[in-house]
Amino acid sequence: MVHFFLLMISIILIASSSAASGVAFLKIDVGARAAGMGGAFVAVADDISSIWCNPAGLSMIKSEEIVLHHQDWLQDTRYECLGYAYPAQNLTLGVSLNHLSTNHIPEILNVNDKPSSTGRLFGASDMSGMFAVSKQMSKQIFIGCGIKYLQEQLDNTTVNAGAIDLGCLYTPNNSFCLASSIRNIGSQMQMDKDTFTLPLMYRTGVAWKTESLCFGIELNKARGRELRGCAGVELKINNPITVRCGYQFLTDNDRGSFKGIPDRVSLGFGVKIGGTTMDYAFAPYGVLEDTHRISVSTKFGRQRFVSKKQGDKGIKIEGDQGIKFEKDKEIVSEDVVIVTTDNIPLREGPGTTYSIITKIGIGTRLQVIDKQKKWFYKVVLPDGRRGWVCSIFVK
């Protein structure tokens, strides 16, 4: 697997096609969380916005999720996106619809070899619809694929095309992740007499995650654009509030130096209330103007957990009424763990992105239900409530 990522990095470094590309909106990062981290999201991807960055990340989703994204882009351009993900038993399915539009383009004609305005304004729009599927191949490897329908309209002329996105994630442990994706693999488009290719884009990166901190860095290369690097950090201040900062740096291949430093810093934050999260990102673009992005996502439905079938004996739960057994649920190990740190979070799923059910005090005895995750155990509290705790806080 490591060799695969080294190969992807090599592809990105040598990809240098300068052919003109159309449907340029496909290069824009979607999702305020990703934008707040400077776009360094290919390895961080673990929520519904993965569908636009790395479809393999959809496998990280444990319950149904829907997101609405609004973006005030450059020069009075609006970008709206809708995404939905459904985690089935062995696959995660996702659909999305993206639409970018502007209606204030002045019509310019050549009169006697001189540009002259007619005073007429016309519109342009880009649209894409995608169906994605993701699968966890093993405890460490996740893959994903998306099939897209693309449409570009300029005044009264419309062209269509199809494309494919591919992605993969490799997580040797719960904290570290390697990831790579290839987006917009498709045919050429033709508008009038002009033929152009899709903006093929390669991305590869790494991420490091803890209970309260996430750091990501990546390299990406799009057709017709120089190699780009970006890095971002996400810090959880407390349960409802998260702050983010990102930095994009472009390399000048002729001089080997950096450029555009003042205009490549992005900032963002997220607020979570129950199962709903609102994310905001701000990114300046110098003389072009600033950009603002807002995403609102909601989780709903029952959570998906890969569970084992239990035997005739059932599940042992320690409570105030002594020991009892419950049938037709997950199999339980014989382990009982004791909490070693005060106020550790009991979460709805095996990861720091899941909501906190309650806080557990030091010395609490927990019955282990599932130890499939190296860094998280599914446990039962003495009162019967169930959730996931980080293994470093128990013994």
Image (spheres, helix red, strand yellow):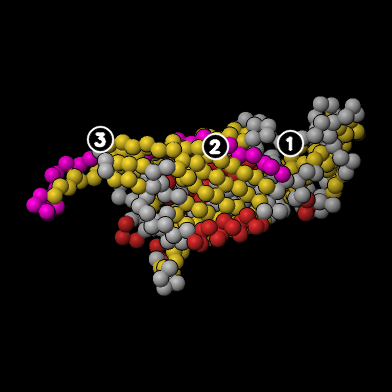
Amino acid under label 1?
Val
| Residue under label 3 | 156
Residues at marks 2 and 1, CA–CA distance in whole angstroms: 21 Å
Magenta span main SS: strand
* Quarter-of-image position of residue 157: top left
Disc nearer the start of the sequence (2/1)? 2
Disc nearer the start of the sequence (3/2)? 2
Amino acid under label 2?
Ala
Q: Is residue 160 magenta?
A: no
Amino acid under label 3?
Asn
Question: Disc 1 on helix, strand or loop?
Answer: loop
Residue at the (44%, 60%) spot, across then down: 16
**Tags 3 and 2 touching, CB below 8 Å:** no
Which is more foreground, mark 2 or mark 1? Answer: 2
Q: Which residues are magenta?
A: 111-138
Question: Disc 2 on helix, strand or loop?
Answer: strand
Question: Disc 3 on helix, strand or loop?
Answer: loop
* Numbered badge on residue 132: 2
Give the class, few, some or many, for how many residues have Cα within 10 Å of label 1's Cα (few <14, many ≥20).
few
Residues at marks 1 and 3, CA–CA distance in whole angstroms: 51 Å
Disc nearer the start of the sequence (1/3)? 3
* Quarter-of-image position of residue 216: bottom right
**Tags 2 and 1 touching, CB below 8 Å:** no
- Nearer-the-camera pick, 33 or 205: 205
Residue 328 placement (x, y as % from top left): 81, 26
Which is more foreground, mark 1 or mark 3? Answer: 3
| Residue under label 1 | 306
Residues at marks 3 and 2, CA–CA distance in whole angstroms: 31 Å
Residue 313 placement (x, y as % from top left): 91, 29
Residue at the (42%, 49%) spot, across then down: 199
User: In the image, 147: left or right of 372?
Assistant: left
